[in-house]
Image (cartoon, helix red, strand yellow):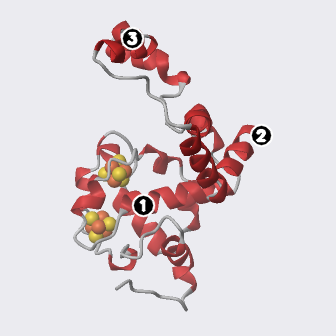
Amino acid sequence: MRTLKLDEDSSKLANEVIGDLKASPSLELFKCIQCGMCASLCPGARYSDYNPREMVKRVLDGDESVVFDDDIWNCFYCYTCHSVCPANNSASVVNQILRQKAINEGEKIEKISSFLTYGDSFRDIGIGSIPSAFFDILVSDFGSDWLDLKINLDGVRKDLGLGPVTLPDDSIEEINEILNITGFTKRMEKIRRS
Ligand code: SF4
Ligand code: SF4
């Protein structure tokens, strides 16, 4: 059962995190023992100044500045920390909620604006797709074959006996309804205007 510390000012940020819609009822943020397992296996921590153990400590200390720290954007949600935490906490989920708080405050928009086309793809065809802004990087990492596959995907699928990747209209409508109800669409508009 989740431990709550409702009366202490220093717990305000932590209580906001565990009260967030993204936090599952089983998230045990207050049970973090600062063992550092998350940081020891975190690829983001290995290659940058980001440290999930330290991020969680700042949340538990009520340090609101962690919300606006650039380093927390070096997590890429591999969930390794989530799977190894002995306290059933999840630095990954905590990170997502902190970033969301920053975006809601109109900060760090530049960190996600290049992903807008990913959201557009969900809205238009009900399936996410790699944002075009990353195509050049992918070609440099994987070679031009990657782009050829992307351009000729329907043909390749046909050769394999598969149809095009499409969803029925009513499924796309349902997905759009979910995007609207959860505030995703509104947030996309807000980011686009920023
Ligand atoms: S979040 Fe989990 S793995 Fe990370 S320091 Fe706390 S208890 Fe350890
Ligand atoms: S989800 Fe983020 S914090 Fe957790 S191990 Fe992966 S990169 Fe690190």
Q: CA distance from mark 2 to mark 1?
A: 27 Å
Pointer 2 residue: 193
Drawn side of residue 188 relative to residue 170, left or right: right
Q: Residue at x 43, y 44 (%)?
A: 74
Residue 72, given in percent of the width and then of the height, sits at 47, 51
Residue at 53% over, 75% down: 19
- Residue 39 picture quarter: bottom left
Q: Which mark is residue 155?
A: 3
- Distance from disc 3 to disc 1, alpha carbons, whole Å, reads 39 Å
Q: Pointer 3 and pointer 1: residues touching (CB < 8 Å)?
A: no
Q: Which residue is mark 1?
A: 93
Label pair 2/3, CB-CB below 8 angstroms: no
Q: Residue at x 60, y 60 (%)?
A: 101
Residue 186 vs residue 65, the one in the foreground: 186
Say which label, 2 or 3, has the lower sequence index: 3
Q: Position of residue 1 (x, y in %)?
A: 34, 86
